[in-house]
Amino acid sequence: MKFRRVSLKFDTQEVLAGFNLEIKDGEFFTLLGPSGCGKTTVLRLIAGFEQADEGEILLDGKNIADLPAEKRPINTVFQSYALFPHLTVAENVAFGLKMSGTEKSDIRQRVHEALDMVQLAEFANRKPSQLSGGQKQRVAIARAVVNRPRLLLLDESLSALDYKLRQQMQIELKRIQRKLGITFVYVTHDQEEALSMSDRILVMNHGQAQQVGAPRDIYESPVNEFVARFIGEINVFDAIVEQPLSEVRSDTRNNQSLRYQVRFALNDCLREITSDITLNVGDKIKVLLRPEDLRVEYLEDAPERPGFVGEVLERNYKGKTLDSLIQLANGQTILTSEFFNEDDPDFDYQINQKVWIDWVHGWEHVIKASDMQADGTDADLINSPEVAG
Ligand SMILES: Nc1ncnc2c1ncn2[C@@H]1O[C@H](COP(=O)(O)OP(=O)(O)OP(=O)(O)O)[C@@H](O)[C@H]1O
């Protein structure tokens, strides 16, 4: 399904302007962004609950923008489940099929299959009030897939569940989606949820597409500061390109990147970096490093080494990792996250301890400083072929 230059205003507020989108058949696609960025509006436009002022919404190449919601082969699972309390689980799931005049025997068969799929066959005769939150959610999903829609829309569908159940349902949803082969369009502001379930994610801000890609691309190669900061923790360092270095580095995915010598604003120190994008001498860049990309060592071990010197402000033992908040010489604070390693004598530093910070070279991600507008908007991206599809 595709959006072509879709615009929508609520009174004077422009929520979407020339918005493009492509969702591939059979994929688990997630719309991710902060509250108010327009995710639900996009979902409601797909469902037909909202009408676009301009543009086309295409399904199988046909413009469905004027087709009423009930005529679209699209179902929605709401956060509130919206089950009928007086009907049993099976009757809830059968409801839509009954209304459309499906044969009784066919209904029985399909309701059974749908409940089997969400592993609720034995609960068929219960009422919604006799179910847990996760079970109600699964009934809502069974009801939404029983008439085999082309697209299933899920609006923050797991947010009412507690953390543990939510994690189980993430796996469950992905399993159901794979089994059915139906295109799922999921809306969330939870980046962890988006990363763990999606085939592709669209990151939005202020009604604009920021980046679309596989979870790994979005996490490891964010196109701007907004995406980098929205998807997990990130440390940002200013630098200027001094000179290109001839050698090329290949990463584990065989992507080739270029090497440069750059001058970091911090300590005015010269370091080598790799970059996926071509840089010119004098370019202002931002070197992005995730907490897990950084390495911390006792300062006494390396007094002469180039790099960033800091002082440990906080350390949090997290079981698998030791996370530290470190203040650098220029006042900037950074977050590091290191896997527990009993054999490393430098591992367990103390508060106020002076430390030296390096990173796993090749893991840095570089963007030009001009790609980093504070509000995350980047006009060039909105209509880029990648986003437009
Ligand atoms: N019916 C409406 N009338 C007026 N303004 C609306 C309406 N629906 C949404 N908006 C506005 O449009 C913008 C986008 O809203 P939308 O619900 O799509 O955001 P969202 O990203 O889904 O947010 P959330 O995560 O909080 O649900 C917001 O500024 C919102 O206030």
Image (cartoon, rainbow, N blue to C red):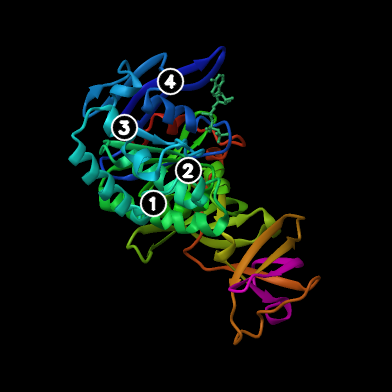
Q: In which quarter of the image is residue 18?
A: top left
Give how far across and how far down residue 7 sits, in percent.
Answer: 43, 19
Instruction: Tell me if residue 302 comes above or below residue 166 in the rendering.
Output: below
Q: Nearer the viewer, residue 352 or 216?
A: 216
- The amino acid type, in three-letter code, at marker 3 is Gly
The local secondary structure at tag 2 comes to loop
Q: How crowded is mark 3: few (under 14 residues within 10 Å), some or many (20 or more)?
A: some
Tell whether circle 4 marks a residue whose Cβ is less than 8 angstroms from ligand 1: yes
Between marks 3 and 4, how big is the CA–CA gap?
22 Å
- The amino acid type, in three-letter code, at marker 2 is Ser
For the residues carrying marks 3 and 4, which lies nearer the camera in this image? 3
Q: In which quarter of the image is residue 186?
A: top left
- x 66%, y 81%: residue: 346
What is the span of residues highlighted in magenta in the rendered image? 296-321
Residue 80 visible, this orientation? yes
Residue occupied by mark 4: 50
| Quadrant for the N terminus in the image | top left
> Does label 4 or label 2 sit earlier along the sequence?
4
Q: Do the residues labelled 2 and 1 touch (CB within 8 Å)?
A: yes
Residue occupied by mark 2: 157
Residue occupied by mark 3: 96
The local secondary structure at tag 1 comes to helix
Instruction: Tell me if residue 270 comes above or below residue 58 in the rendering.
Output: below
The local secondary structure at tag 3 comes to helix
The local secondary structure at tag 4 comes to loop
Quarter holding ligand 1: top right
- The amino acid type, in three-letter code, at marker 4 is Glu
